[in-house]
Amino acid sequence: MSSGTTGLTWFKSSYSGSQGDDCVEIAIADQAIHVRDSKDTTRTPFTVSHDSWTPFLRSLGRA
């Protein structure tokens, strides 16, 4: 995992399925919001700025 995401508190996205098989986790940091696949936490997370978070969710039809 990249050093920029070490020590973050991750939580399951409310948009993840309730079955537990397709989970997206997010961590909110001072400089950015990080998104990862809960089944493969060793992969580098997707990172988006706070200013871009709402437009990102809108692009997914979630905001």
Image (cartoon, rainbow, N blue to C red):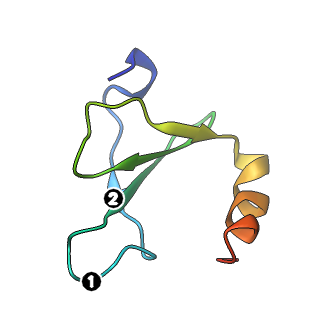
The answer to whether residue 30 is above or below residue 39 is above
Q: At label 2, which amino acid type do we have?
A: Phe
In-image side of 18 versus 60 (left or right) = left
- Quadrant location of the N terminus in the rendered image: top left
Q: Residue at x 30, y 67 (%)?
A: 22
Q: Position of residue 3 (x, y in %)?
A: 39, 16
Q: Which mark is residue 11?
A: 2
In-image side of 5 versus 39 (left or right) = right
User: Closest to the observer: 57 or 8?
Assistant: 57
The answer to whether residue 22 is above or below residue 43 is below
Q: Position of residue 47 (x, y in %)?
A: 57, 38
- Quadrant location of the C terminus in the rendered image: bottom right
Q: Secondary structure at mark 1?
A: loop
Q: Which residue is mark 1?
A: 18
Decide: marks 2, 1 in contact (CB < 8 A)? no
Q: Position of residue 35 (x, y in %)?
A: 47, 48
Q: Residue at x 70, y 41 (%)?
A: 49
Q: Secondary structure at mark 2?
A: strand
* Disc on the earlier residue, 2 or 1: 2
- The tally of labels here is 2
User: Closest to the observer: 32 or 56?
Assistant: 56
Q: Residue at x 38, y 73 (%)?
A: 16
Q: Position of residue 17 (x, y in %)?
A: 33, 79
Instruction: Report how far apart the C-alphas of labels 2 and 1 lie in the structure.
Output: 14 Å
